[in-house]
Structure formats: structure tokens, C-alpha cells
Image: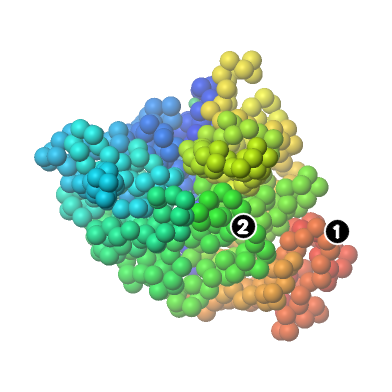
């Protein structure tokens, strides 16, 4: 395995600092809290922590609005805590990657403060400023009709200097001007080299395909005639100079630290369906990113005009979304590398989205999804709480319990729609649909505090239980049933099953991390079936496997329904050639090798 880069068979665990563990009782998770859980992470069997932004920030977008790349958000801790964290993880064989958020900064960043100070500020050109357009009535209008990711126009009028600035996300997140070489150098120095020098091992690169803008800023086609602001994602992404910028960043900021083979980079790559475009980012030859995270799976069922009004989808859509990314490494002869994940801080919980969070199926669903994810090819990412089977927030919670600006902007837009409705009943229907949608898709489902035990506030905070200090976000009502303490050392719990699977994946990494994925029975909407074969392009042979069973092939069969389902044995893996390796229920409960129980998943060795 020596020829493989370390990040290929890594298991990455994403930590959302505000919600992981509060060590000082102020209701906000912090870096010392994370340090205190290093042994927990090590025992789980992960080997990289991805820490979501912990930088100094006014927290308009939970830290994705950075006011200083070289400092820490005070409630999270101090710079010195980061040094302790790096050491605590490294001494346990765990690497650390940070979130690199360099498409935009906070409007509180000193760079933007200077930029907006006057039109002839030396940093004016560090952000993107444009004059107003005037319509036929002489009304001032922004330079184009693009809708920002969180709603409204992407342009914000600045009264003192009489120009608009660009913001793809919230108006408090102005976009940096990557056309300016001095700005780029400042980004590399402050956001990238500063942290590599301190000893981190890489980055998750936020919204990596948006740095280069189409400078003529053409209007987007009208898809929402009721609004002046139009969906423009395809125009935001993959701009004309993006690859030039990324190659420059790698050369200037990563190569001095060992380059892409040594420094892990995983780019967030929304809205990029064309494999040719994807390849430009992740081909090893291109010397840009190691891998990317695509949203094909987590975006399933999201609306385009109204993101949180869910659209129907079925298991075949899930299969197709995963399969698209599974073939990448094999098809490129090892030149490209891929990722596997089902949750992050921007998505609702995978059990609620893709299986069943009904009490009688919840744990089985957790194990089923775990078995699927750990048997797929690529670098595996899991999100805090996923290992204990955390699920979405209760439907009964009112919108005030949600903290995310995206949810509140959506809710406000729906209220505006309801205000125009013909009758109170019609208005009611609109708001019920809004809350139904939020309950399925809101980002906050992933952001509620981690559930450590059954004590008040789920053991998330050390604050006294008298209610004098509340966690920054309400703990999910189900914490007495779903928590780490209840699952620790409990055979068959999601947590124990994840541990077991992570060690199984590592032991048989030639098949599960590097193997070639072949899907079977695609049109079956109930069962997901695939085989994993040794991928010769990876240079790994069955004999090299450390495990007791040096199989060259495995069959994976996953039942996504609440009914028993027949296993589909592909022609070259008939039942008599298959030997059960793992079941997500329990091997001794398997009575029929050819029938899956509700929400059961299995791996068979194929002889
Ligand atoms: O949130 C999304 C889907 O629910 C995406 O549209 C997301 O906004 C986009 O993928 C970019 O995400 C990243 O940058 C945002 C931040 O809000 C997200 O948390 C972050 O993951 C702005 O920095
Ligand atoms: Ca705290």
C-alpha cells in the first residue's frame, strides 16, 4: 500500500465546533471540548478530523463568514488551543484538516473594511464593486438579476461609496476579487500557509468552483417570474480562470509543504454535473485538488426555485447519484480519486432522508447506511452524530428553534407568498408546506448539539442543569434514546456497528476503499445491489490483504424497505458461491441467505 497517498484510505470525521462539546459551560461547543473527545474519536477508528470553521467570525453564517483567518472565534478558544488540538490528534495518529473559506470573507474582515472605506482605497479592488444600472423609470438597479444563495440579490448597495458589491451568499459575506494578484497572495498567506506552518494536514475547500467570476455578469434566464432575482448557480460556478487560480494556489501555498500528495485537499463542488469538468479539478495530473465532494446524493429532492419544498425521489435516484462517483477512480486508471458521504453540516440527517427514522426502524436504518457507506470506493467522510444514528429534529418544533439564516430566509419567502394567498386556508396550506419542507431538508438538522449521554442537554454542555445557560441551539428531544453513552460497548448499536465496519473496511481496503464498483439490478427500487472487485489500476492484489479472507470479490445487498426482500444474486455470483461476511442485523439472526430483513444490509464474500 505504500504507493497510495495517505488520504485515500482515510476516514474523515467532520466536527461542527459549536455543537460538538462545550467544555466551559457557556452553551457553545469549543476546541477544548473537542480535545477532550480525542480518545472517543480514536476509538471510533477515524483518522482525520475535518473541523468546520473555528476562525474569528461574527457568525452570520456559522463561521463561514470569516473576519480573521489567523485568529479563533473567542467562544471556541484561542490560537494556543489549536496547537494543543493538533498535538492531541497527531499523538493519536489522527490528522487535522481545516475549512478553507476563500470565496468570500465576512464584511467585518479588515480587508473589506478598508475596501469599502472609499472608492480610492488601496484595497477597493480586493472585492467586486460595480456601478448601478438604471431602469426605464430611472430606478437604481443592481448590475444583474442573480439571486444569492440565501435569497435576495447577489448585489448589495453601499450608500457611502455609491456602488454595489457582490455577495454570492449573505450580504455579510462579500466575494473576494480573485482577479487581483495581490489579493490572491494575501489569501494564500493568511488562510493557507499560516495554518500549514502551524502543522495542519490539509483543507476542505469551501465552494471551490466559484472564485473566478464571469466578469461581464450576464443576466440569468428567468425561472421564477414572480421574483426579480433568478437562479444563477451555473453562472456562479466554474468560471473562466478557476483552474489557473487553483494551480497557482497549489504551487504557491501547498507545494512548499509537500504538495497534493502530502497535503490533503477536498473541494466542495456544487453544480458541476459534467465529468469532463470534474476531471479538471481532481485529475492527479492537473495538480489541483485531491478529490471533491459532490452533492448529487444530498441534494436529491431539493427544489430549485424553493430549495426546501421537497420533490419526490426513489432509491434508483440514490443509486444513480452514488454510482456516478463510484466509477471515477477505475475509469481514470487511478488518475482520479473519489469520495463517499451522506451527511454534512449543510444537509439533513441521512436516516431521515434516505431510510426510516421511525422508532422501530431507526437503528436498523443507521446500520444499513453505515454498511453501504463503508463498502463504497473512495475517501469516506462521516459527520458528527451520524455514528450514533442521530435523526432530524421533531416536526412539532416551531421555526424559532431553528438557527440557520437559510431556513429563516426561506420561511420569510413563504410567508410573503402566504400573504398573497386567496384565502386563510390557502395561506395555511402554504405555511404547513413550508414547515414540512424545513422538517425534511433544513441544514439545522445536522447542527443540533451532539448527544453524548442521557443527562440534561445530552451531556453536550457542562452548564448547570438549572436552565440558567441554554445550549446555543436546542438539543433534539430524542437524546435520552439516542446518545453515545447508551451505545458504547452495546453489541449491535449503531456506534458499535460503525466501529466494527471501520475496522473491517480498513482490513479489506483493497476491495472496499480501492475496489472497482459494479452495480446490479439497477431498476429495483427496493434493494441496492453491487459487487466490489479488486481494481488492478490501484496496484493492490488480493494477496496483500491483511485480513483472514483474501477474497477478490464481494457482493453487497441493501434492503431499503420495511418488508423482507429477496437478495439479487448476479449471474457470476450465484447464492452457492456466496458466503455471508457481515449482516447489519446480526449474522446469527440470518435464517435465509437469500432473503433480507427490513432495512437489512449484507456483505458476502464471493468465491
Ligand atoms: O447549503 C447548501 C445546500 O444546503 C449549499 O448551497 C451551500 O451553500 C453551498 O454548497 C456552499 O456551502 C458552503 O459555503 C457556504 C456555507 O453557508 C456552507 O455552510 C458551506 O458548506 C457559504 O460559505
Ligand atoms: Ca464553550
The answer to whether one can see residue 435 in this image is: no
Element carrying mark 2 = loop
Q: Which residue is mark 1?
A: 589
How far apart marks 2 and 1 lie (CA) works out to 37 Å
Comparing 257 with 453, the one in front is 453
Number of numbered discs present? Answer: 2
**10 Å crowding of disc 2: few (<14), some (14-19), many (20+):** few
**10 Å crowding of disc 1: few (<14), some (14-19), many (20+):** few
Q: Is residue 320 above or below residue 297?
A: below
Residue 134 image offset from top left, x and y in percent: 24, 48
Q: Residue at x 39, y 61 (%)?
A: 221
**Residue 164, quarter of picture:** top left
Q: What's the image's color scheme?
A: rainbow
Residue 487 image offset from top left, x and y in percent: 72, 41
Circle on res. 311: 2
187 sits to left or right of 550: left
Q: Residue at x 76, y 47 (%)?
A: 358
Closer to the camera: disc 2 or disc 1? 2
Q: Residue at x 52, y 45 (%)?
A: 345
Amino acid at each position: 500500500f505504500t504507493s497510495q497517498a495517505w488520504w485515500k484510505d482515510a476516514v474523515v470525521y467532520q466536527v461542527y465546533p459549536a455543537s460538538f462539546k462545550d467544555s466551559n459551560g457557556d452553551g457553545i461547543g469549543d476546541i477544548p471540548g473537542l480535545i477532550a473527545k480525542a480518545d472517543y474519536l480514536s476509538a471510533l477508528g477515524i483518522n482525520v478530523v475535518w473541523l468546520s470553521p473555528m476562525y474569528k467570525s461574527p457568525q452570520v453564517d456559522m463561521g463561514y463568514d470569516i473576519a480573521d483567518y489567523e485568529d479563533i472565534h473567542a467562544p471556541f478558544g484561542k490560537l494556543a488551543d489549536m496547537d494543543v488540538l493538533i498535538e492531541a490528534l497527531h499523538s493519536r495518529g489522527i490528522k487535522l484538516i481545516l475549512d478553507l473559506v476563500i470565496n468570500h470573507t465576512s464584511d467585518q474582515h479588515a480587508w473589506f473594511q478598508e475596501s469599502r472605506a472609499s472608492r480610492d482605497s488601496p484595497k477597493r479592488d480586493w472585492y467586486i464593486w460595480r456601478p448601478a444600472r438604471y431602469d426605464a423609470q430611472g430606478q437604481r438597479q443592481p448590475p444583474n438579476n442573480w439571486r444569492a444563495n440565501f435569497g435576495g440579490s447577489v448585489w448589495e448597495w453601499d450608500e457611502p461609496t455609491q456602488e454595489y458589491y457582490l455577495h454570492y451568499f449573505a450580504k455579510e459575506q462579500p466575494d473576494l476579487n480573485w482577479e487581483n494578484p495581490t489579493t490572491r497572495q494575501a489569501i494564500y498567506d493568511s488562510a493557507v500557509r499560516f495554518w500549514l506552518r502551524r502543522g495542519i494536514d490539509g483543507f476542505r475547500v469551501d465552494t471551490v468552483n466559484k472564485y473566478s467570476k464571469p466578469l461581464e455578469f450576464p443576466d440569468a434566464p428567468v425561472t421564477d417570474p414572480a421574483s426579480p432575482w433568478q437562479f444563477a448557480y451555473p453562472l456562479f460556478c466554474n468560471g473562466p480562470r478557476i483552474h489557473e487560480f487553483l494551480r497557482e494556489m497549489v504551487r504557491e501555498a501547498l507545494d512548499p509543504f509537500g504538495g497534493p500528495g502530502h497535503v490533503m485537499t477536498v473541494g466542495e463542488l456544487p453544480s458541476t454535473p459534467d465529468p469532463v469538468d470534474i476531471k479538471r479539478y481532481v485529475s492527479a495530473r492537473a495538480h489541483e485538488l485531491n478529490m471533491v465532494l459532490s452533492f448529487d446524493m444530498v441534494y436529491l429532492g431539493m427544489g430549485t426555485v424553493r430549495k426546501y419544498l421537497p420533490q419526490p425521489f426513489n432509491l434508483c435516484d440514490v443509486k444513480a447519484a452514488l454510482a456516478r462517483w463510484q466509477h471515477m477512480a477505475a475509469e481514470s486508471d487511478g488518475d482520479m480519486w473519489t469520495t463517499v458521504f451522506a451527511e454534512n453540516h449543510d444537509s439533513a440527517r441521512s436516516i431521515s432522508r434516505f431510510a426510516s427514522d421511525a422508532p422501530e426502524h431507526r437503528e436498523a436504518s443507521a446500520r444499513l447506511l453505515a454498511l453501504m457507506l463503508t463498502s463504497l470506493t473512495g475517501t469516506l467522510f462521516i459527520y458528527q452524530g451520524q455514528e450514533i444514528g442521530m435523526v432530524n429534529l421533531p416536526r412539532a418544533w416551531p421555526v424559532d428553534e431553528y438557527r440557520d439564516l437559510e431556513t429563516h430566509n426561506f420561511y420569510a419567502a413563504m410567508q410573503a407568498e402566504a400573504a398573497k394567498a386567496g384565502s386563510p386556508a390557502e395561506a395555511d396550506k402554504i405555511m404547513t408546506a413550508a414547515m414540512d419542507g424545513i422538517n425534511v431538508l433544513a441544514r439545522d438538522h445536522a447542527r443540533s448539539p451532539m448527544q453524548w449521554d442521557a443527562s440534561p442537554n445530552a451531556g453536550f454542555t457542562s452548564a448547570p442543569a438549572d436552565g440558567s445557560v441554554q445550549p446555543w441551539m436546542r438539543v433534539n428531544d430524542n437524546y435520552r434514546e439516542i446518545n453515545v453513552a447508551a451505545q458504547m460497548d452495546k453489541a449491535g448499536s449503531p456506534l458499535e456497528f460503525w466501529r466494527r465496519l471501520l475496522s473491517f473496511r480498513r482490513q479489506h481496503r483493497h476491495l472496499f476503499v480501492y475496489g472497482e464498483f459494479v452495480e446490479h439490478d439497477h431498476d429495483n427500487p427496493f434493494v441496492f445491489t453491487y459487487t466490489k472487485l479488486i481494481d488492478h489500476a490501484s496496484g493492490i492484489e488480493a494477496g496483500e490483504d491483511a485480513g483472514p479472507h483474501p477474497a477478490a470479490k464481494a457482493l453487497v445487498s441493501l434492503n431499503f424497505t420495511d418488508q423482507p426482500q429477496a437478495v439479487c444474486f448476479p449471474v457470476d455470483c450465484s447464492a452457492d458461491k456466496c458466503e455471508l461476511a457481515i449482516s447489519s442485523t446480526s449474522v446469527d439472526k440470518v435464517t435465509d441467505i437469500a432473503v433480507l430483513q427490513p432495512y437489512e444490509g449484507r456483505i458476502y464474500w464471493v468465491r
